[in-house]
Image: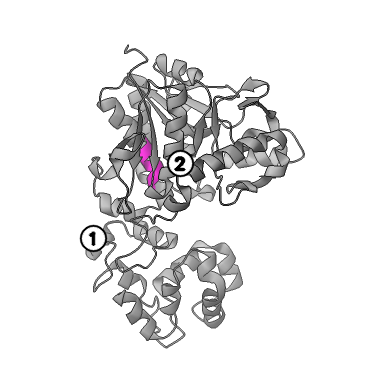
Amino acid sequence: MRPLSHVAVCTIVSKGYLTFARVLAHSLRRHHPELPLYVLVVDRTDDGFHAAGEPFEVLWLDDMAVPDLRRHRFRHSLQEVLVMAKPLLLSDLLDRGFGHALLLDADMLVLDRLDPLLEAMRAGSPALTPHLLEPPSGPDRVERELNILLSGVYNGGVVGVSDTGPGRAFLDDWGKRLATHCRCAVDQGMYYDQRWLDFAPSHHESLAVVRDPTVNVGHWALPERRLRMQGETLLVDDRPCRLFHFSGFEPWHPERVSRWSDRLRMSDLGPGAAIFKRYAALLRDAGVERTRRFPYSFGRFDGGVEIPDVGRLVYRGLGDGIDRFGDPFANGKGSFLRWLCEPVDGVREAGAVVNRLWDALYHSRPELQAAFPDHLGAHRGPFLAWAREGGAAGHGVDRAFVDTAAPRRGLRELLRR
């Protein structure tokens, strides 16, 4: 077995999240100066980013052996790409000769030594941390448990593996599932990577579950944790916190604990709110107001039209039929974008066009089907009015697609972008 010094820590970001990786790097160096941090960047940087000046080693998704990477980036949202890259990055670090690799989400702060995680990896086992360590309390306890069951028992923000048979088998199994079924589709049993981790105890005998209340402390467990500050030290149940997970926290919304949950506000945390205030200050000092404005390189078609999630869903559903479109990001003749903007039923009258994108959105949303039962007939007008008056903004659809549901001139303008 390799000594524990052969450990690599890693995280995955888009360029808009670089500041979070910087803060993580500085906190890791303070408590584990012996451990290198590798940061995988999943898009391209053309906004003044210089890898040599960062407090971590930079890796690029472009340099990894991902088959048909450009189509892969089109099929999946940024969040999906970030998650799908986890087993790839961990495997890459083991291939580089590290005996152990520990993945941490970028929105974490190392506050003390990570010995419980490192010891779990020393045994050669895949190491995971559960969301809950005991049944939740309070009047909403059952609802909270149901939410955890929908999103996954284990938190995907901390995953440790070793270069052993069990470690490699775990990564192979997890990676295969994420390659084809990494989506936020709770009604279909998927929540990115986390629901697949639920199988780990039954599929892998040597799994280590790190049940330490000071490790991977996140919003999901805060109602059961007692947080207080002792000087500069955050205490969790009277013990120094080792690793805090600011999952969903946005420093530009300082009153909100997490965008993933509206159950907690800062005022509910008492003394524990101080750690969020400190983290927000660290992010600001590291340049978050600049980096958060960096656009994702693969979030738009050529010409600038934003790719909606429903468009990605349609593309995935076409299977081998996507070959006819060539480059999925193109916007010219024969492109997927042009096909997506075509009327679904041949009706081309100004103001009456229901294109393939809006038809796909309709069929993906039961509430739309209930509101407009005959969207291509008697309810065509109300359905298109809904699309123009708020449907686009509410479902992340570029206004350009609304224009294609009105005069034909809108489609021509869209395709010229």
Query: Percent position (x, y) of residue 375?
Result: 52, 76
- Magenta region, mostly helix, strand or loop? helix
Q: Which residue lies at the image location 32% right of the left edge and 39% below the top edge? A: 53
Q: Please state which of residues 1 and 304 is positioned toward the viewer in this rendering.
A: 304
Is residue 84 rendered magenta in the image?
Answer: yes
- Secondary structure at numbered mark 2: helix
Query: Percent position (x, y) of residue 229?
Result: 66, 28
Pointer 1: what residue? 323
Query: Percent position (x, y) of residue 343?
Result: 38, 78
Q: Which residue lies at the image location 61% right of the left edge and 30% below the top edge? A: 132
Q: Which residue lies at the image location 57% right of the left edge and 42% below the top edge? A: 150
- Left or right: residue 254 compared with residue 375: right
Quadrant into which the C terminus falls: bottom left
Query: Percent position (x, y) of residue 266?
Result: 68, 43
Chain-order first, disc 1 or disc 2:
2
Pointer 2: what residue? 20
Question: Which of the colour schemes (rainbow, by chain, secondary structure, one colour) is used?
Answer: one colour
Is residue 111 rendered magenta in the image?
Answer: no
Label 1 to label 2: alpha-carbon separation: 38 Å
Q: Please state which of residues 392 and 187 is positioned toward the viewer in this rendering.
A: 392
What amino acid type should be assigned to the residue bearing mark 2?
Phe
Q: Please state which of residues 262 and 9 is positioned toward the viewer in this rendering.
A: 9
Quarter of the figure with residue 360: bottom left
Quadrant into which the N terminus falls: top left
**Depicted 145 relative to depicted 4: above or below:** below
Is disc 1 surrounded by few (<14), some (14 to 19) or many (20+) residues within 10 Å?
few
Marks 1/2 in contact by CB < 8 Å: the verdict is: no
Q: Please state which of residues 331 and 248 is positioned toward the viewer in this rendering.
A: 248
- Secondary structure at numbered mark 1: helix
Point out the residue furthest to the bottom here. 349
Q: Which residues are magenta?
A: 81-86
